[in-house]
Amino acid sequence: MSSHIDVAVSDGIADVRLDRPEKLNGLTMPMLRGLASAAHRLRADRSLRAVILSGTGDSFCAGLDFKTVSADPKQLPLGMIPRPWRGTNVFQEACWAWRRVPVPVIAAVHGHCYGGGVQIALGADLRVTAPDAKWSVLEGKWGLIPDMTGVRALAELVGIETAKRLTMTAEIISGEEAARLGLVGQVSPEPYDAARELAGQLAQRSPDALAAAKKLFDSRWGSSPRRTFAKERWEQTKLLMGRNAKIARKAGLQREQPVFAPRSR
């Protein structure tokens, strides 16, 4: 079965698209596995500079397609079993795998962004939304909770009270409101174009510095100051000794555009 996940890489930027437009990119089990698999493959590409997650057609993602998934009753319980070596199940890995890709991941959101779609967007590092996009932690409508890493991601971005309210009410909010609450960092009438511009801007920075920044923020956001400071020192030492930092320093002194080597790790 097709995973309905399209991946194309150009100039070091990966376009990853949910491609089931006739169903508003509603998620199936093959799509969830396809998202995780795409992240795993891209993680190994050291020439990669950024990733853009988007959806074809009229929506980013309308959430899990319960009708299709329920056609095979075994799919849901099997998908809930975590892989011991990762600590995530199929649903969680479709989102959290993007946190493990050592380049900036940008979600470009338009149309519907419901349930699992929200959690995929929150798995990215950065988000751009259309002002009239519709966001909802829709699981609450079906008597469920976000279980694709959404609880952790929501709490990181909006604080516990707003996270509880969005989860408990399942209210639908606009892209503009999502930005006001902190779910999104940028609003644009053309979110994909804005994401592409941002990816191009990030591609001009050292890939090693971007990887270190992502790792440091994601791994130390909730840790003690002492542990964070130690990790800062360790990451900075490795950067200072690395090839790409030298390239950045030389280009800066000579007022030239740096041409970086592939990511070191």
Image (cartoon, helix red, strand yellow):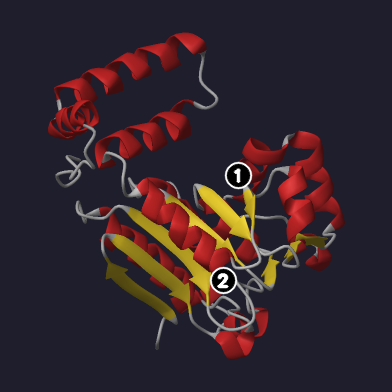
- Mark yes or no: residue 141 visible: yes
Amino acid beneath label 2: Leu
Q: Give the spatial CA distance, label 2 vs label 1.
A: 22 Å
On screen, 97 above or below 117?
above
Residue at 49% x, 82% y: name it: 19
Q: How many discs appear? A: 2
Q: Position of residue 125 (x, y in %)?
A: 49, 47
Residue 142 falls in image quadrant: bottom right
Residue at 61% x, 72% y: name it: 61
Q: Is residue 135 left or right of residue 223?
A: right
Are there few (<14), some (14-19), or many (20+) residues within 10 Å of tag 1? Answer: many
Q: Position of residue 26 (x, y in %)?
A: 61, 78
Helix, strand or loop at label 2? It is helix
Residue at 62% x, 86% y: name it: 23
Residue at 24% x, 30% y: name it: 252
Viewer-side residue, 57 vs 88: 57
On screen, 164 above or below 160?
below
**Image mark for residue 153:** 1
Quarter holding the N terminus? bottom left
- Mark yes or no: residue 89 visible: no
Q: Earlier in the sequence, mark 2 or mark 1?
A: 2
Viewer-side residue, 108 vs 216: 108
Helix, strand or loop at label 1? It is helix
- Name the front one of labels 2 and 1: 1
Residue 213 falls in image quadrant: top left
Q: Residue furthest top?
A: 226
Amino acid beneath label 1: Ala
Viewer-side residue, 7 vs 119: 7
Residue 41 falls in image quadrant: bottom left
Quarter holding the C terminus? top left
Q: Position of residue 65 (x, y in %)?
A: 63, 79
**Image mark for residue 76:** 2
